[in-house]
Image (tube, rainbow, N blue to C red):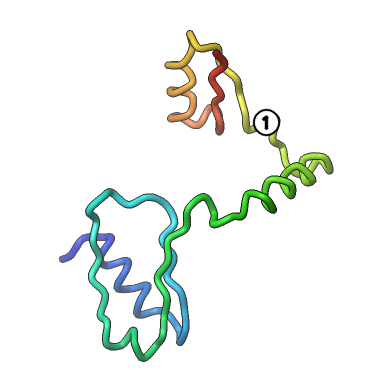
């Protein structure tokens, strides 16, 4: 039996329709490889791509988030918590256990 990552890639490749796209979301460890059956993929014309930071365009995405926040539809204030530098370990711990989404350390 192969690794879960290889099996997932194979299943995804088999499930694609013509001109479908496989998207890697998240981070794989450096050096991770996944073999693809290339012959059939040429017939399908599928695409493999990675997504970094949601593949957003900051000049468009950030103003959109600000607009949503102004409308009360993006709870930015609930996602961010500030920590004094002396509490940096608490900030890391809160981030790791999900207590806060975005810890910000203030110097």
Relative placement, left or right, of 27 versus 91 is left
Residue placed at 42% from the left, 52% from the top? 26
Among all residues in the image, which is located at the extreme front?
59
Residue 3 place in picture, x, y as percent = 21, 60
Among all residues in the image, which is located at the extreme right?
71
Tally of numbered discs = 1
Among all residues in the image, which is located at the extreme bottom?
43
Which quadrant of the figure contains the N terminus? bottom left
Relative placement, left or right, of 18 versus 42 is right
Q: Secondary structure at mark 1?
A: helix
Residue 23 place in picture, x, y as percent = 44, 65
Among all residues in the image, which is located at the extreme top?
86
Residue 81 place in picture, x, y as percent = 61, 23
Q: Which residue is mark 1?
A: 78
Residue 50 place in picture, x, y as percent = 42, 61
Relative placement, left or right, of 18 versus 29 is right
Residue placed at 46% from the left, 74% from the top? 21
Which quadrant of the figure contains the C terminus? top right
Quadrant hosting residue 82: top right
Q: Is residue 67 above or below residue 104?
A: below
Q: Is residue 79 above or below residue 88?
A: below
Q: Is residue 31 above or below residue 105?
A: below
Residue placed at 55% from the left, 33% from the top? 101
Along the line of sight, the residue nearer the viewer: 99 or 23? 23
Residue placed at 49% from the left, 12% from the top? 87
Along the line of sight, the residue nearer the viewer: 99 or 46? 46
Density class for disc 1 (Cα within 10 Å; few <14, some 14-19, many ≥20) is few
């Amino acid at each position: 039996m192969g690794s879960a990552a290889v099996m997932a890639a194979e299943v995804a490749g088999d499930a694609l329709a013509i001109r479908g796209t496989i998207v890697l979301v998240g981070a794989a460890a450096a050096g991770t490889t996944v073999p693809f059956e290339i012959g059939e993929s040429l017939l399908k014309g599928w695409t493999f791509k990675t997504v970094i930071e949601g593949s957003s365009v900051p000049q468009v995405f950030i103003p959109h988030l600000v607009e949503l926040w102004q409308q009360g539809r993006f709870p930015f204030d609930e996602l961010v918590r500030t920590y004094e530098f002396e509490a940096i370990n608490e900030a890391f711990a809160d981030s790791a256990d999900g207590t806060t989404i975005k810890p910000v350390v203030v110097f």
